[in-house]
Amino acid sequence: MSEEKMKLRGDLLAGRVPKRVFMQLTFTPEAACGLAGVDLVKAHFDPAVKQKAYRSVCETFYSDAYPIENVRWPEVYAPLGARNWVMSSTGAMQHPEVTSLYEEDFDEYIDDAFGTIVKKVLPRLYPKLDPANPGAGLSLAKAYQRYQQTAGEEVGFQMQASEEFDYAPGFFVGLFCEAPFDFLSDQLRGFKNITIDVRRNPGKVEKAVNASLPLMRRQAIPRNPAPGATVFMPLHLAPYLRPADFERFYWPTFNALVQEIHEAGMSSFLFAEQDWTRYSDYLASFPENQIIKFEDGDVKKIKEVVGKKQIIGGFFDPTHTLTRSKEDCIDEAKRLLEIGMPGGRFYFAFGRHVIDIHSIDIGKLAAVIDYVHENAVY
Amino acid sequence: MANEKLVYETYGDFSAEHPEYAEKWREFTEPVILAEDDGIYGFLFGYLLI
């Protein structure tokens, strides 16, 4: 692990201007298998195949931090009979829209969110956990054991690759949670139902979001938080809400969670999905040096409002390499650097993970990455 | 601890169908389900629900 990259990372996270721009790229296992020419289904169940695929990404694209993100493991979901994470015939993990908290469950959830999740929500998402089915405990034990084993394999290869390719730690260190409104919406009510709920049952939605906060607090903040650790939060629904609904249902508990993570000595690593430009002032109001990756948005405004206090990255769409010339893609990266770099608190990242290797031009993307590596110098 | 106990009570007792293995499985699953560290909570409320 090079001192140079550790210093880059440390300066970035402390809000100091680093020697050059830190680069954190992300490819999924699907992209890695496509690049290596190996079967994704096999890769899920054979660490040697998976690691061959990961290695091909490390060898092809420069990054300052480990560039693979794999968090959906079919070998963990399958023993539970998962309805929400299902492996397709190609090995891609699919996420059907699900509802596990019914409208008639709202009062019970508001009163006892933990108990409702254990007794109703989890068994509805994972039928093998239904206490009415024999062997629920065995299914849980099997899945949990597999979860720990796969996590060990993933971390093991990450450490090996970090040694070989000289990576600094990335920003995702294993801690994650959701903004309470997203937690209620995602796999409990479902996106379609929650948009009806905010019209039909605003009072109950507000109370249910508040009831979700302690669960997410417990999820985010370990009993012994490591100083400087980051807690990842994918931010899903805010761009779809009217401003008044964001202000009432999304912001208060989201803000409270970020503040409490900060008070525990940690930082939030937020992925602002879609376009969060109109919420720039909110993001700027957090304690300084939260890490925020943007999928899209007005880069100039976000840099001006958010980027003077928070650490920002993202925006670059790797799929543009399929439709634009190499020079145009490099120009796009240049424009991003010109706006993002001044004053520091900026890192280079894709706005979206590379999921399908055929969605990018490998040579052009590698050229863009090399350009940033060689030229994004202060 | 009270919350984790609910998890165990809801999912943990399968000794009825395999009484001969009840003690062994309890030894294996009880520390997992009643663990006071963050592991089982993070699995149930994080990995399975986020």
Image (cartoon, rainbow, N blue to C red):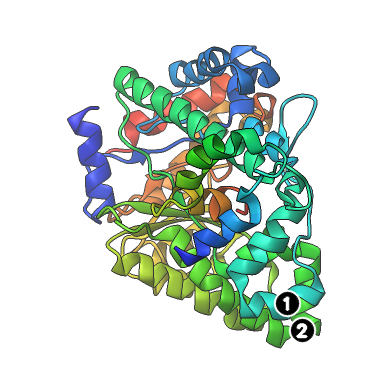
User: Percent x, y for residue A204?
Assistant: 70, 83
Callout 1: residue from which chain? A
Residue A32: quarter of image? top right
Quadrant where the N terminus of chain A sits is top left
Label 2 marks a residue whose chain is A
Q: CA distance from mark 1 to mark 2?
A: 10 Å
Same subunit under labels 1 and 2? Answer: yes
Residue hosting label 2:
A201
Q: Vertical placement of B46 versus B18: above or below?
A: below
With A314 as the anchor, is A304 left or right in this view? left
Q: Quadrant of residue A373?
A: top left
Q: Which mark is residue A106?
A: 1
Residue A362 or residue B1, whichever sits in front: B1
Q: Residue at x 36, y 60 (%)?
A: A290
A136 lies left or right of A262: right
Could you say which is closer to the camera, residue A334 or residue A94? A94
